[in-house]
Amino acid sequence: MKLPESIQVIERGWLSSNNVVLHARTGAVVVDSGYGAHVPQTLALLERVLAGKKLARLVNTHCHSDHMGGNAAIQAKYGCRTSIPEGEAPLIDRWDEQALILAIADQRAERFRYDDTFRDGDTLRMGGYDWRVIAAPGHDTHAVMFHSPEARVLISGDAFWENGFGVVFPQLFGRDTALAETRATLEAIGRLDVDVVIPGHGRPFGDAGAALERAFYRLEGYEEDITRLARHCAKVMLSFALLEKRSMPLAELPAYVARVPILAELNSRYLRMTPAAMAEWLLNDLERAGAAHRNDGTLYATGN
Ligand SMILES: [Zn+2]
């Protein structure tokens, strides 16, 4: 498994998406900008990887906080052209905190501007290769992937990971097609010629076929029982918040799960627990998964 020299992946921890830097004489392109709380680190890493060369363009696979959180800062520093998926544009125009999964999930991102959009079927020139834009709905309705048939590389964002895919939101806010979209996106990936996948989180990987099998297995579990997905979604949302805050007083957790709209809606629609019971269940589950541990009345993120 080897990436072309012009493609460099800055692999990040879980709060931030990876940043993919594609070098070319006409200027570099960076795909995705990480989470807002990590901006200083993102800028330092980018500066090192660019080594004085020009950053011509910033491109997003989708507009979730951990992929667009550094957009404003990167624009301010490099004055680069910014391009986003066409479907995200109206959400960015009106800064739709619900559709962008910001305040409703206790997440934040600095508002940014974009210069243009791209859509399924378009071709982007990045790192000396032509990349086909492929719609990748599921985790985010408007998400895209970038595929270079020549380099045989897929930049998959959160549509496809080495172990699964980015959390899919069950029927919330009137949207009930997410699992069917996820299946169609995975099937589309199966039809591509790919030697290396660069996911939005985690290391680049080969053997897309085996990873697809794992992804389909996971998807089938959710298709069989939607409450599995609701539980997974609640755990992902709390883990993310905990990673940002690093710690939370245990006594505040029931009020937190009742206050954050996405957790409250998952609970009222699928889980139907008291806030205290939901907090206790989440706590036990995150501890069992090694994502958190409690000590002296406080819940701490472990970073796993
Ligand atoms: Zn995402």
Image (spheres, rainbow, N blue to C red):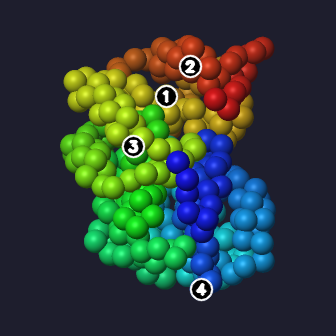
Front residue of 19 and 95: 19
Picture disc at residue 26: 4
Front residue of 146 and 249: 146
Q: Nearer the viewer, mark 1 or mark 2?
A: 2
Which of pointers 1 and 3 lies earlier in the amino acid sequence?
A: 3
Picture disc at residue 208: 3
C-alpha separation, residue under disc 4 versus residue under disc 2 = 46 Å
Q: Is mark 4 within 8 Å of ligand 1?
A: no
Q: Would you say 158 lies left or right of 81 here? A: left
Crowd band around label 1 with a 10 angstrom C-alpha radius: few (<14), some (14–19), many (20+)? many
Residue at left 43%, top 51%?
Answer: 195
Which of pointers 1 and 4 lies earlier in the amino acid sequence?
A: 4
User: Where residue 303 sits in the image (x, y, percent)?
Assistant: 67, 32
Crowd band around label 2 with a 10 angstrom C-alpha radius: few (<14), some (14–19), many (20+)? few
Which of pointers 1 and 2 lies earlier in the amino acid sequence?
A: 1
Q: Would you say 108 lies left or right of 271 here? A: right
Q: Would you say 41 lies left or right of 127 here? A: right
Which of pointers 3 and 2 lies earlier in the amino acid sequence?
A: 3
Which of pointers 4 and 2 lies earlier in the amino acid sequence?
A: 4
- The residue tagged with tag 2: helix, strand or loop? loop
Q: Residue furthest bottom?
A: 26
Residue underneath mark 1: 235
- The residue tagged with tag 4: helix, strand or loop? loop
Q: Would you say 166 lies left or right of 248 here? A: left
C-alpha separation, residue under disc 3 versus residue under disc 2 = 26 Å
User: Where residue 94 sits in the image (x, y, percent)?
Assistant: 43, 70
Picture disc at residue 110: none
Q: Amino acid at mark 1?
A: Lys
Picture disc at residue 289: 2
